[in-house]
Amino acid sequence: MLPFKTLLRIDRNSTEAVFKQIASQLVLLIQKGILLPGVQLPSARVLAAELELHRKTIMAAYNDLITEDWIISKERKEYRVSTLLPIIKPRTYADKAKSSYKAKSILSFDRLEHVPLLKTITADFKVLVNDGFPDVNIFPIERFSGEYRRLLTHQHLKKTSSNLNIDGCSIFKEALSLFLNDTRGLNIEPENLMVTRGAQMAIYIAASMIIKPGDKVLVTTPSYFFADAIFRQLGAELITIPVDDDGADVNALEDALLRNKIKLLYIIPHHHHPTTVTLSSPRRTKLLEIITTHQLTVIEDDYDYDFQYQYSPYLPLASGAHGGNVIYIGSLTKVLGPNFRIGYMISTSDFLSSAIKLKTLIDLRGDVLTEEIIASLMQSGEFSRFIMKANKLYRDRCNYAANLITNELSHLVDFKKPQGGMALWLKFNENYQLANIINKSASMGLQFTGRGYFRDKDLSHDAIRFGFAALNEHEIDFAVDILKKITS
Amino acid sequence: MLPFKTLLRIDRNSTEAVFKQIASQLVLLIQKGILLPGVQLPSARVLAAELELHRKTIMAAYNDLITEDWIISKERKEYRVSTLLPIIKPRTYADKAKSSYKAKSILSFDRLEHVPLLKTITADFKVLVNDGFPDVNIFPIERFSGEYRRLLTHQHLKKTSSNLNIDGCSIFKEALSLFLNDTRGLNIEPENLMVTRGAQMAIYIAASMIIKPGDKVLVTTPSYFFADAIFRQLGAELITIPVDDDGADVNALEDALLRNKIKLLYIIPHHHHPTTVTLSSPRRTKLLEIITTHQLTVIEDDYDYDFQYQYSPYLPLASGAHGGNVIYIGSLTKVLGPNFRIGYMISTSDFLSSAIKLKTLIDLRGDVLTEEIIASLMQSGEFSRFIMKANKLYRDRCNYAANLITNELSHLVDFKKPQGGMALWLKFNENYQLANIINKSASMGLQFTGRGYFRDKDLSHDAIRFGFAALNEHEIDFAVDILKKITS
């Protein structure tokens, strides 16, 4: 007899019944070829003794497997693995080195060389500083689990399965458009809204519809690197305009428009990525004028809008008079954290009906259950309360980090406290090498996951985004302490 | 005083505490501008009387809102809506007609005209026949809810948030590659696997990497319409080869290769979409020879592999000797239903590392929680058991539907029972108009959600996919009965 005592491991803390665990693990042994077709299994009595379980438990497992055709029984006495099961493994290579997928591809992908690689954290760390993500420790786990359980019924699955939901499920589109109207001064209907997998997919789809190879796209320098990478991927030429403490230089923008045939402007007016600056009020007014005068197509990326720390928040360009030229893109990932990638695109209904066609080719439908859970939280008011709570927490952390860094690291970095968002843009004194500092920090348990920005023709200093929102005061202390130690 | 009794609706069956419901609903009234900043709220005693609740319940709600800065209190006696809340709505248009998004876009999207539109079901129906989807009534809801609750902890969210998971979370990639090796005779490592949102995204990414405008792509006719649409979207010219009862015509394929410079072959060897035919064994062997001889790049779309109803399943091309030229694409959506869009791409590691770069631009990370739930079910053996259970059910339904349609509808349709999959390919007798039949059926409560295929130069008959997997015998009876009634 096989050593079933070692092969079948019962977890008494599992929510799965013991007989079901045994049945499932027998299936795994069959699939792995440890129990071959035709092989006789021990009687229920023998296996029960071996596993120190009741004979009826083994019988229940065997009966399940008989029903499912994994094993066959002769008069409920002799049990054998079914000989009718497909045997997959022996027909193919036993030797991994022979896999066809060990080959090198004959294709070349030079067009993707410009796409930056995100780095995976493999080393140990005590504190991880991201480049601006929310604190998942305040995530409403109980409500999400509860709603998930409430919604995941066969009846409800059947209902949602028969809807298409390419552009988001209707209950979520309704709730989200009301939420956006209430919080951003927009005036949209659900037909102006398409739900995507994060803002990233929305930018990709909008850009793919607008840009043809050779087109010129206006971006700030620096800008969100994965947006730049999309435009390059689509064959666009990037025309750059500088950013200062008041946001994108709108005069330079107007200048660029006069000198070039610009197909698209990509702009982040709130807490610009990466520099965290907010476009000033006069520049907003001027930009809206330019947009309508030039009939300039704009992607407004407003990923961070919900986190503004001053009394009177700036509204997005999208809520101004722009003649339908502003495609507004946002994300709930900055509210709920990176495990929940829900973004959206807002535009005129004719643009959107084409965008939905393109989305169909990329991603046939969204995550209906998560959309419905969020809709439910929006309708009950809990979503707004959650944002308010997060806002207070992050504002306090922003102040705490800003004060501490001002007091302790003035020799190392310069920064301007942002009006909102989740990160500080730390500009490094030229006497220090950012790359060295990142490496030394890592060796002392402080990991930066954000990208380092290095001095070049457009940037007068090394810089990195210091995401404070996910760090408690103790962790901020730790981070600042390490940076101080390695630079003094 | 406002009519709070009507404005605040308490749901005593909700899992949310009553005081939290009141707090959340007051927030909604504030956000909607019904309770304006500075307005005085009724005392806890008065509101308690109005709502027939205990005074302490109202106090608890008010205290929550004070903590969250929604309301302010003077010595815990007088409560007012905070004057420091941002007022968004009044600054913008009161009139919906003035929204900038009422405009028409100045852009044109002629490049998307070829993308077919899926239709939304709006009419009432008794039975809905899809074009080949699983039965969500057997979906393991308890296990999914249980695992969701187990995994959704703050600690776990924190852990998964700090990983990138662009190509799928590592625990799922490990489990899925073992599952695919066991069931498909593959011989891959996790580095050969990228997780996507359904097979659709995998096809889109693979095609985007391979095709440049003007390239020639070899497809069967008919073929999966959204794959054709992707290739056209990327500017490819489609070269077609016919399909018969043994699958794609491999001689015609070889012929096309000699006459054209072909960049890519797209093929569905198992239960071809839409015709459900399976590529015969001799043709598979010949096709593998052609692939290696011509170094032909292939997308093998194997969306339906897990559902084969004969003893000895055909293995995919991907498990044969193809020199790394076959990009293998599959989906778990056909196992779990359309609410769970998980697909994958298998290829050489160098192709995949570029594919991951492109995926980053489209969709930064996947649905980590769902991936982990499925990984857990794969590791315990439950996933295989679930497929076995579904397989038996669908095989029985396939036989039932095939027998009934043969007996009752031979005047109307012709079909060949497929070796697996979830649909019958019903070819309509030329005396009947498919469009009419679909419309008449709908008026009698029988809705087809699949696309109708109509006679043209490549197709000798009207046809539609009859998805039997999601229909019980009673529903199959109903569908056949309606079709019989309207054609006799």
Image: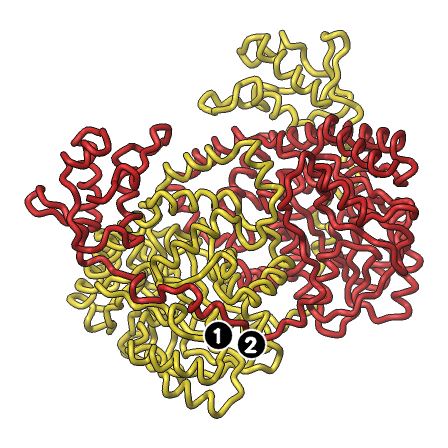
Chain colours: A red, B yellow
Q: Residue at x 26, y 67 (%)?
A: B419
Residue A184 badge: none
**Residue positioned 71% across, 50% down in the render:** B97
Q: In this rendering, is residue A213 above or below B450? A: below
Q: Position of residue A448 (x, y in %)?
A: 73, 43
| Left or right for A458, reference A71 | right
Q: Residue A213: which quarter of the image?
A: bottom right
The quarter holding residue A486 reads top right
Q: Nearer the viewer, residue B194 or B37?
A: B194
Residue at point 34%, 75% (across, down): B462
Q: Which residue has dot 2 on it?
A: A106
Disc 2 element? loop
For disc 1, the marked residue is B325
- Counting from the top left corner in percent of width and height, residue B430 is at 29, 79
Along the line of sight, the residue nearer the viewer: B352 or A262:
B352
Which three-letter amino acid code belongs to the residue tagged 1? Asn
**Residue at x 48% of width, y 72% of height:** B324
Q: Amino acid at mark 2?
A: Ile
The spot of residue A443 in percent (x, y) is 72, 41
Q: How many numbered marks does the figure carry?
A: 2
Residue A306 shows in this picture: no
Chain letter of disc 2 in the image: A
- The image quadrant where one finds the C terminus of chain B is bottom left
> Would you say the residues marked 1 and 2 are in contact, meaning their CB atoms lie under 8 Å apart?
yes
